[in-house]
Structures are given as C-alpha cells and as structure tokens.
Amino acid sequence: MNLILGLIVGLLGLLWGSFLGVVVYRTVNEGSPLSGRSRCDKCKKKLSWWQNIPLISFLLLRGKCFYCKKPIDWSYPLIESITAVLFVWWFVVGRSFFLLAGSPWSIVQPVFWLVVGMALLVVFLTDLKFGVISDGVNLFLFSWVLFYRLILVGSGQMMMADLLNAVLSAIVLTGFFYCLWWFTKKKGFGFGDVKFAPSIGLLLGWPRTLVGVMAGFIIGSVVGILLIFWGKKKFGQTIPFGPFLVVGIVVALLWGNDLWNWYMGMLQ
C-alpha cells in the first residue's frame, strides 16, 4: 500500500513539476503562467495533450519538438523529475519535519512546507536559467510564509516573540542585501536577491537566517572558484546567487540549529 501511495505521490509530483516548468518560463518571458495552453518555446505552436505528458512526452519525442524538431529545453524534464523526487521525499520522510500535532496541523503543516519547497525550486531554476528571481514568485513566497506565521500565532501554535524574531531577521537581512546591491554598484548583486531576503528571514528566523546566508555565500564562493578554475567563468564575471541561497535555506532548515550550536561551542 505504501508503495502504491508513493507512486501516486510521485505522479502528482510530475504533474506539479510540469506546471512549475511553465511558471519558470512564463514569469520571466510572458508575465503570467496562466496565459493559454502550453506551446513550443521555439516555434510557438500549441502542444497536443500527448505532447505534454510530463517526462513521458520528452522521452517519446526524444527531446525535440514534434513540429519544428528543435531541442526541448532541458529545464522542463529536470524540474518535473526534481518535483517528483521532492514529492516522494516529502511523503516518505519530509512530513515528519517540523510536524505539529493535532488536527488540522498534522496536515496543514506538511502542506505548507511542500508548497515552500516548490516555490524555492522555482526560485532556484529561474535564477539559474535566466539570472532573475521574478517579483511574482518573491511576492507569493513572502505572502505564503507571512500568512502562515500569522495563523500559527493566532492559533497559539507560535509565540509572538518567535514571529518578531522572524520579522526582525527579515528586516536585517533585507537591509544587508540592499547594502550589498548598492555597494557593488547594482551589478555584482541582483536586486531580485534583495526582494528574496524578506522571505528568507521570515522563513528561518534567528539564528538560522545567518546560517543559511553564510552557507549560501560559502557554497557560492566554492562553485565560483571551481568555474574559474575550469575556464567556465572569468574573474569578475557574476553567477546567479539565488540557487546558492536556496541551498543555504535547505541547509539551515535541516541543520541550522546544530551548526549554530557547533560554531558557538568553538568560540567558548
């Protein structure tokens, strides 16, 4: 029974991944992910239902458009596969993280984190592919997290002090990112990252916000050095920072408190 449920959840993940792929492309190029039926990015012909089956159509068409024969963008099967894995991981393991007891929280809390995971995946791929984090995704994530935090406080599941902690973290991080954007002359640090900061602080709070941001900077620096070493980038060229912030958020959510306690223990 668990295997069957896992397969069903994986299929749902593929379907949602197909939608997220549309969100990634259209929020940057067309503004709205709901602007009509799916179509080829190259020849703009509308796709039939059998050409739009998540992952399966990509394999059947051998990665090329049925009409113009040009390659289908790699991001579509990638985000579909990752979302399917995210759903299965969430079903098997992730539902137990930060789980609140009692109805309806035993259901609402896991759903909240699943939606957060999908939003972060969109941020990751949008910035990686196009070098931007869309305002629509930033606004959705911030509103989603803030709304949920307020519900938790109103229902007594979260203390007001913890909410204020998260809000203060969001304000400080946004100010810090804004200063980076300003001092790099608006070129070395994207303003989309500044707009992403409130969601990070509100989601993580203190001290996990610091852990997540530091993890993002460290991982981004290592990757940047490796890209220069391999000749993929030249010194002074920029790389999208959003994907590293997303990885840092995941690190902070899973191990943030442990890493903070370990670091503070080293200072004593």
Image: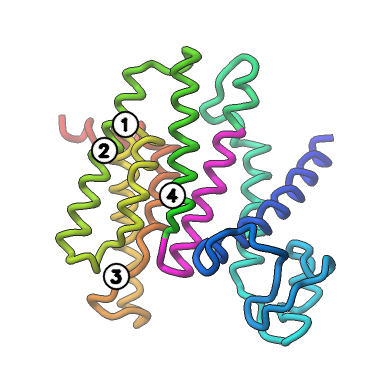
Q: Left or right? Give the position of 53 relative to 242.
A: right
- Disc sitting over residue 167 in the figure: 1
- Disc sitting over residue 235 in the figure: none
Q: Position of residue 68 (x, y in %)?
A: 72, 87
Q: Left or right? Give the position of 41 relative to 145.
A: right
As shown in the figure, which amino acid type bears the numbered disc 3? Ile
As shown in the figure, which amino acid type bears the numbered disc 2? Ile
- Disc sitting over residue 171 in the figure: 2
Q: Residue at x 44, y 63 (%)?
A: 127
Q: Could you tell me how far apart the alpha carbons at marks 1 and 4 are, in whole angstroms? A: 16 Å
* Tag 1 and tag 3, C-beta contact below 8 Å: no
| Quadrant into which the N terminus falls | top right
Residue 27 in magenta stretch: no
Q: Could you tell me how far apart the alpha carbons at marks 2 and 3 are, in whole angstroms? A: 30 Å
Magenta part of the chain: 111-132
Q: Could you tell me how far apart the alpha carbons at marks 3 and 4 are, in whole angstroms? A: 28 Å
Circle nearer the viewer, 2 or 3: 2
- Please name the residue that numbered disc 3 is placed on: 225
Q: Residue at x 22, y 65 (%)?
A: 186
Task: Name the N-terminal-most of marks 2 and 3.
Answer: 2
Residue 124 in magenta stretch: yes
Q: Position of residue 163 (x, y in %)?
A: 36, 24
Residue 66, above or below 184: below
Q: Position of residue 188 (x, y in %)?
A: 24, 67
Task: Name the N-terminal-most of marks 1 and 3.
Answer: 1
* Tag 2 and tag 3, C-beta contact below 8 Å: no
Residue 100, above or below 267: above
